Image (cartoon, rainbow, N blue to C red):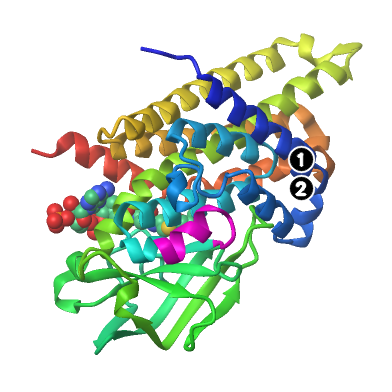
């Protein structure tokens, strides 16, 4: 088994790290406080090829592998997890789904601008009564000639008010449950489509999270992805890849927590010596580093399986389950190591904790990941 990154991987990692340090770090605290969407940074991420990393070049993407995506996501999220989730949704949910299951016409019209970063995408699955129970879709899409008429509400939609294009899951046949859901591409500005409510959040505060409302919103039949009834499987298959992105985001937050802790322990003195000289601090740092490396290996394994076109959904669920817990624990440890300073804004670690928590919730809670993993183990 190979554990080495190739030259492209190293170049992507270095480019992402430099971009994050130069362009994101100086404004990350302020954007978090003001809940400001990083428009300029997202535009530059597009120019770097980071908004459609795994999409073939012919469709506007960078034509890279999932391992490269993990490396870039970790570096961006290490500095700014809000930017990480914006990037992750566009890459692993929107452009991945369109590339795998979109028609040629949909790819020409939507995938090319989305993957090249000219447009931004969102993925609207969750509803007030369909979070973990995702097949319980109350948004209805009724066929009327060459159109579907969408009615319903989506919530907690990342990029929801900033996106130009939204992939919307809706029920086309109520009698069929999960098999009666379809996916539609909806353009911003389509009559009957409104942004309803912006959420005020604990963390990832400079990303955009909103409710969306559909009231007699007419969407052309040509904008349906795949066959009628394919929508739930589309969402699940897409989320299998999405969970690699969120595991990488968690990894970035965890690594940031470790880096901050190491730096602080080497410059803070207590009882006449650097706190790095106390075993209580040393052991915390050793445990953090070990757990982070284990999370990184799981995440890279999920990405490597995806790149090898082997089943990867179980591994991506394990990676997200594990990495998200590692991120929360690492951020908590980082605050403890920083003491009172850790509880204050300027040392960043309080932001890491607030940002880490969501990785245990979105793209499937930790409980949902356990359902996925245990079902895979226990199935006949
Ligand atoms: N790949 C392919 N097919 C899949 C699949 C997968 N990963 N998972 C399920 N399916 C199929 C099943 O095989 C089944 O098909 P058949 O009937 O033909 O066998 C069908 O889909 C229904 O599956 P289940 O019976 O397993 O469905 P369920 O109702 O029991 O739900 C669940 C399973 C795992 C809990 C699922 O609902 C789930 O993943 N929930 C969490 C949803 C989620 O992750 N939401 C995130 C929102 S997006 C987001 O967060 C983005 C963001 O903003 C950052």
* Span highlighted in magenta in the image: 108-120
Q: Quadrant of residue 151?
A: bottom left
| Residue at the disc numbered 2 | 28
| Residue at the disc numbered 1 | 348
User: In the figure, 219 relative to 161: above or below?
Assistant: below
Q: Earlier in the sequence, mark 1 or mark 2?
A: 2
- Which residue does the image show at 41% across and 49% down from the upper left? 365
Q: In the rendered view of the protein, which quadrant contains the N terminus? A: top left
Cβ of mark 2 under 8 Å from ligand 1: the answer is: no
Foreground residue among 50 and 321: 50
Q: In this rendering, does residue 363 appear at all?
A: no
Mark 1 or 2: in front is: 2
Q: Quadrant of residue 175?
A: bottom left
Q: CA distance from mark 1 to mark 2?
A: 9 Å
User: In the figure, 149 relative to 365: above or below?
Assistant: below
Question: Neighbour class for label 1 at 10 Å: few (<14), some, many (≥20)?
Answer: many
Q: Is residue 33 magenta?
A: no
User: In the figure, 20 relative to 131: above or below?
Assistant: above
- Which residue does the image show at 89% across and 14% down from the upper left? 271
Residue 11 lies, in percent from the top left, at 61, 26
Q: In this rendering, does residue 39 appear at all?
A: yes
Residue 358 lies, in percent from the top left, at 54, 50
Q: On the rendered structure, is 255 left or right of 167?
A: right
Question: Neighbour class for label 2 at 10 Å: few (<14), some, many (≥20)?
Answer: many
Foreground residue among 373 and 154: 154
Helix, strand or loop for the magenta stretch, by majority: helix
Foreground residue among 310 and 267: 310
| Element class at badge 2 | helix
CB under 8 Å between discs 1 and 2 = yes
């Amino acid at each position: 088994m190979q554990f080495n990154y190739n030259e492209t991987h190293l170049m992507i990692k270095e480019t992402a790290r430099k971009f994050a340090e130069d362009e994101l770090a100086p404004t990350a605290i302020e954007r978090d406080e003001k809940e400001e969407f990083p428009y300029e940074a997202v535009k530059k991420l597009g120019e770097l090829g980071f908004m459609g990393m795994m999409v073939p070049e012919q469709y506007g993407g960078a034509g890279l592998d999932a391992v490269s995506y993990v490396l870039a996501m970790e570096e961006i999220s290490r500095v700014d997890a809000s930017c990480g989730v914006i990037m992750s949704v566009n890459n692993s949910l929107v452009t991945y789904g369109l590339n795998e299951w979109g028609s040629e016409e949909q790819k020409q019209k939507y995938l090319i601008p989305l993957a090249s970063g000219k447009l931004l995408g969102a993925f609207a699955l969750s509803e007030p009564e369909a979070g973990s129970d995702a097949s319980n879709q109350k948004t209805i899409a009724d066929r009327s000639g060459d159109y579907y008429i969408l009615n319903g509400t989506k919530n907690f939609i990342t990029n929801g008010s900033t996106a130009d294009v939204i992939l919307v899951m809706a029920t086309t046949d109520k009698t069929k449950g999960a098999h009666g859901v379809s996916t539609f591409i909806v353009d911003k500005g389509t009559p009957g489509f409104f942004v309803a409510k912006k959420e005020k959040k604990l963390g990832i505060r400079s990303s955009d999270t909103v409710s969306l409302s559909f009231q007699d919103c007419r969407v052309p039949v040509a904008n349906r992805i795949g066959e009628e009834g394919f929508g739930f499987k589309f969402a699940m298959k897409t989320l299998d890849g999405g969970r690699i992105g969120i595991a990488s985001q968690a990894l970035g937050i965890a690594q940031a927590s470790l880096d901050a802790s190491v730096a602080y322990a080497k410059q803070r003195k207590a009882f006449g010596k650097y706190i790095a000289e106390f075993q209580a601090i040393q052991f915390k740092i050793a445990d953090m580093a070990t757990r982070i490396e284990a999370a990184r290996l799981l995440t890279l394994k999920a990405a490597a399986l995806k790149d090898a076109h082997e089943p990867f959904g179980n591994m991506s669920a394990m990676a997200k389950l594990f990495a998200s817990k590692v991120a929360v624990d690492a951020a908590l440890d980082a605050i403890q190591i920083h003491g009172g300073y850790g509880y204050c804004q300027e040392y960043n670690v309080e932001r890491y904790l607030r940002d880490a928590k969501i990785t245990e919730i979105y793209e499937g809670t930790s409980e949902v990941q356990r359902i996925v993993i245990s079902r895979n183990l226990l199935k006949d």
